[in-house]
Amino acid sequence: QRASERLATMSDDAELQAIRARRMAELRAQAGGAGGPQGPTIPGLGAQGGGQDPAEQEEKKREMEERRNQILRSILTSEAKSRLANIALVKPEKARQIEDMLIMNAQRGAIREQIDEGHLKQLLEEISEKTRATSKVTYQRKRFDEDD
């Protein structure tokens, strides 16, 4: 029975990964493809060509994501990776923005040592300060007419 539960969990994980990959592909297509304004272009894995078959494009996306994850693993401590993963669950676009910033800084050589959780918190606070001024919450209350 436990083996069947593990098998079900593994198939759920695979399905979840496939759904995530499809969604990321959709978002990239809407943003104008990889390497556009959405994120940095990773060296050796340039922008996608328009004349390639879908399997080749999917392979390039997979390679680019693997390279991206490799860079993040090399510059983040395990605690920082965990915090970033938690952020990605709640706000995937914000996590992607942070990842892009970290990768660009690593490629420029601005990051000389691994980033720990404290440093990541500082980066998050800086980003929040920049976006806090532009966010606004409005409440709309339902109004009920009384028939008196």
Image (tube, rainbow, N blue to C red):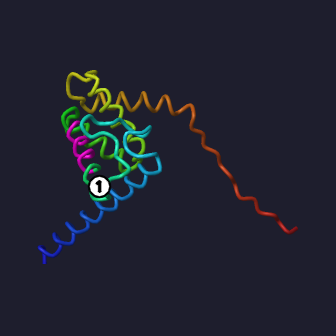
Say which residue appears at 44% left-offset and 31% top-offset: 127
Residue at the outermost bottom position? 1
The C terminus appears in which quarter of the rendering?
bottom right
Secondary structure of residue under mark 1: helix
Question: Which residue is at the front of the view, 31 or 45?
Answer: 45
Q: Quadrant of residue 94?
A: top left
Label 1 CA crowd tier, 10 Å (few <14, some 14–19, many 20+): some
Q: Could you tell me residue 47's position as x and y percent?
A: 34, 41
| Residue appearing at x 24%, y 37% in the figure | 44
The secondary structure that most of the magenta stretch takes on is: helix
Residue in view at x 34 percent, y 57 percent: 20
In the rendered image, residue 57, in percent from the top left (x then y), is placed at 30, 53
- Examine the image and state in which quarter residue 111 appears: top left
Q: Which residue is drawn at 85% across and 69% down?
A: 147
67 vs 105, left or right, is left
Magenta stretch contains residue 69 = yes
Residue kind at label 1, given as amino acid type: Glu
Residue under pointer 1: 58
Magenta run includes residue 15: no
Position of 148 relative to 62 (above/below): below
Placement of 6 over or under 29, stated as above or below: below
Nearer-the-camera pick, 32 or 51: 51
What's the magenta region? 62-71
Q: Where is residue 136 in the image (x, y as percent from the top left)?
A: 60, 39
The quadrant in which the N terminus is found is bottom left
